[in-house]
């Protein structure tokens, strides 16, 4: 897909207090090992798969779908959709991904969108 704007951002849009609340909440929740698209459907990774995955991504995640978080974030998602000229039409939002990085962890450069939709 060719877009005029590949991203849109707002500077200091969400109050610092709300950001702090989201971070505090995310750190209180049980995390899980983060995976990349190639391993999203695998129930349990073997040692070789884990080693291969960690070449690209070594972090932990929490999935958040709490209404109070969406209430703070979604108005900006809608506004960015309009401002950037994307005009995407959607009927639901996926859970928010909160990533936790310990010292030495990382997520290498990657692209989340492609010129064709995902097969699933």
Image (cartoon, rainbow, N blue to C red):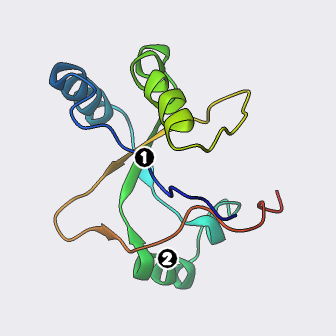
Q: Which comes sooner in the sequence, label 1 or label 2?
A: 1
Q: Secondary structure at mark 1?
A: loop
Give the label on residue 114, or none.
none
Please report the residue visible at 32 percent of the width from the left and 34 percent of the height from the top. 26
Q: Residue furthest right?
A: 119
Query: Picture coordinates of residue 47 (x, y %)?
Result: 51, 80
Please report the residue visible at 41 percent of the width from the left and 71 percent of the height from the top. 57
Q: Secondary structure at mark 2?
A: helix
- Quarter of the figure with residue 117: bottom right
**Residue under numbered circle 1:** 8
**Residue under numbered circle 2:** 53
Q: Residues within 10 Å of mark 1 (few under 14, many from 20)?
A: some
Locate the C terminus and report the quarter of the image it occupies: bottom right
Q: CA distance from mark 1 to mark 2?
A: 29 Å
Between residue 81 and residue 66, name the one nearer to us: 81
Mark closer to the observer (1, 2):
1
Count of marks placed on residues: 2
Q: Is residue 110 above or below residue 99?
A: below
């Amino acid at each position: 897909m060719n877009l005029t704007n590949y991203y849109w951002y707002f500077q200091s849009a969400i109050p610092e207090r709300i950001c702090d609340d989201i971070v505090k909440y995310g750190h209180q929740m049980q995390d899980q090992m983060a995976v990349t698209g190639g391993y999203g459907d695998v129930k349990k990774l073997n040692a070789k798969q884990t080693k291969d995955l960690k070449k690209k991504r070594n972090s932990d995640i929490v999935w958040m779908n709490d209404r109070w978080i969406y209430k703070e974030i979604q108005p900006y998602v809608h506004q960015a959709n309009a401002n950037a000229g994307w005009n995407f039409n959607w009927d639901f939002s996926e859970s928010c991904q909160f990533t936790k990085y310990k010292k030495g962890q990382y997520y290498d450069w990657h692209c989340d969108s492609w010129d064709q939709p995902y097969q699933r």
